[in-house]
Amino acid sequence: MSLQQDSKPRRPGRPRSARADKAILRATIELLAEQGYPALTIEGIAERAGVGKTTIYRRFSSVEEIMVRAFSEIDVDLEIPDTGDTLQDLLELTAFFRERAATAVLFPVMSQIIGTALTNPSVLKAFREHVIQPRQAAVRQIIERGIARGEVRPDVDPALIADMIPGGIIFHKLFQLPADAELPADYPGRVLAALWDGIKAR
């Protein structure tokens, strides 16, 4: 065998399938919404995703790792509007929140996490870091920008508003509506209208 043949690089292994990745993460979120974290297993995820267990083990070391990755994908396309008008930015952002809630299993997941948090705070921590905090940060950035523009009172606390807007929507959906009812299309706007009178510059 020649030196040239000896130094020939090894062919890489089979590349990971993006389709399998998406199927695994989608299955994890669906099962979490339906059954809760304690019932989540590698076997169940593999069956729902239509992949083998070895496919999952090549990618993840535990159910919790899959769950954290799945949470990080929920709002991967979150963009912070910048229309030049603070109220319009908030309206567009909350419309995104409502649309995402209507087309995904976000609120069922959230209701399961509320029950799980008492016995497994790491689940709540992961959800807070990857879903709740990015939404709060988006609201906070818009409010800070509004203060800089002179559209929002300078004494307004952006962090407080960042709690109130997503918090009001989440509370209404989880605790005021039937489990299978969609959040009314006008509800985020009503929340903003009530808040805006209190925070807009005089």
Image (cartoon, rainbow, N blue to C red):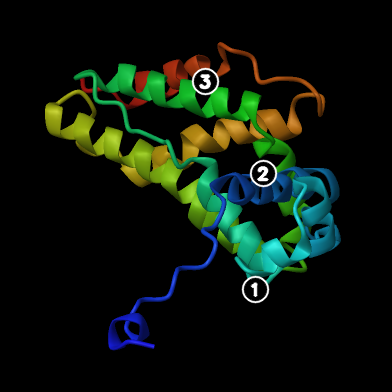
Residue 110, horizontal then vertical, whole percent: 68, 45
- Judging by the rendered image, the residue that carries numbered circle 2 is 26
Which picture quadrant has residue 111? top right
The quadrant of the image that shows the C terminus is: top left
Query: In the shown orientation, is residue 128 left or right of residue 200?
Result: right
Q: Is residue 92 above or below residue 75?
A: above
The residue that appears at 66% across and 29% down in the rendered structure is 172
Residue 149, horizontal then vertical, whole percent: 13, 27
Q: Is residue 75 above or below residue 40?
A: above
The amino acid at mark 3 is Pro
- Judging by the rendered image, the residue that carries numbered circle 1 is 61
Which structural element holds mark 2?
helix
Query: In the shown orientation, is residue 137 left or right of residue 94?
Result: left
Foreground tag (1 vs 3): 1
* Contact (Cβ within 8 Å) of mark 2 with mark 1: no
Query: In the shown orientation, is residue 42 left or right of residue 145?
Result: right
- Disc number placed over residue 188 in the picture, else none: 3
The amino acid at mark 1 is Ser
